[in-house]
Image: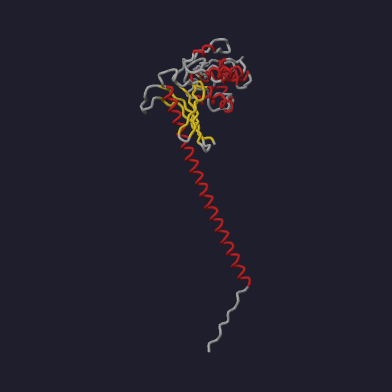
Amino acid sequence: MSRPVVRRARPAHARGVAFVLVLWVIAMLSILLGSFSLIARTENLQARHLFDTTQARYAAEAGLNLAVYELRKSDPAARWVGDGRPYTFGYGDAEIEVRITDDSGKIDINAADETMLANLFTARGVPLDKAQALADAVLDWRDPDDLARPNGAEIAEYKAAGLPYGPKNAPFDTVSELQQVLGMDYALYEQLEPSLTIYSGRGAPNAAFASAETLAAMYPDASPEQLQQLILQRQAMAPGDAAAAGIMLPDGTPLVAGGGGLTYSVKSRATLSNGASTTLDATIRMGGINTAGRPYVILRWRDGEAS
């Protein structure tokens, strides 16, 4: 006869340890699955965001190209006007708004005089004494000599301010170079930048294309309401409308429409149906077909997305 097999029961503590290990394994698997799910969702959102912004960016670029086409029309009555008025149209799944500003309606920091510059700064809330100092510093930056104006700044003033550079003593090559002028800060520059250019060569902006901020520098005694009303009247006029001659500027002279240049700042904003949007801000110079096969030259290009 064979002996009966005696099975001994496992101790209770061993069964408890096994149960705890099973719980730990389940918990770890749950964490791993949750992490994989989160990563997959994040990558999907990133891919969708990239797709939407890319689609909106190319739609905004289509707005820029349409602006060039409209600006090149031979019929002045059908041509788009570079006075900042909005032009809206649909393009695929996007709604596009284009605003064009003729750079002749901006303040050229290489050509504007001390009074125009000081008025520009005071119109942005800068105290008069600081505005005059900034205007002189701008002139000292672009003039060829090392003689400081009464409130200006040459190399000695820059060194006294602890700056490792001095004035350029040459014209501005870019508008953003204005940030290097002694006394200029980024917050003020950010407000001024839309009103500035280096491409018009005009000592005074063309009022037919100037923004409210630029008009405030041209006519410092005019009220904001008066300037805004002037812009509304101007933008209500169709191209070539003879009624534009009846619009009076704050100094009592009639507004002379036309006479713009060949350089334009174009802001094209494309918004998709899901709310994704991209704004393209470019400065272009019109002309013949260039070597890249385009009827314009890009002088400045900046694009950014907005939610």
Outermost residue, top side: 252
Question: Is 36 situated left or right of 291 in this image?
Answer: right
Question: Is 165 situated left or right of 75 in this image?
Answer: right
| Residue at point 58%, 79% (across, down) | 7
| Residue at point 60%, 74% (across, down) | 10
Q: Is residue 281 above or below residue 37?
A: above
Task: Pick whichever, 39 or 166, lies toward us.
Answer: 39
Q: Is residue 48 above or below residue 22?
A: above
* Residue 9 image point, x, y percent: 60, 76
* Residue 147 image point, x, y percent: 54, 16
| Residue at point 56%, 27% (across, down) | 190
Q: Which quarter of the figure is the C terminus placed in? A: top right
* Residue 53 image point, x, y percent: 49, 37
Snapshot quadrant of residue 225: top right
Name the colouring of the figure.
Answer: secondary structure
Task: Pick whichever, 279 or 142, lies toward us.
Answer: 279
Task: Pick whichever, 116 or 306, lies toward us.
Answer: 306
Q: Is residue 46 visible?
A: yes
Q: Is residue 153 visible?
A: no
Task: Give the tally of numbered discs.
Answer: 0
* Residue 282 image point, x, y percent: 47, 27
Task: Pick whichever, 13 or 154, lies toward us.
Answer: 13
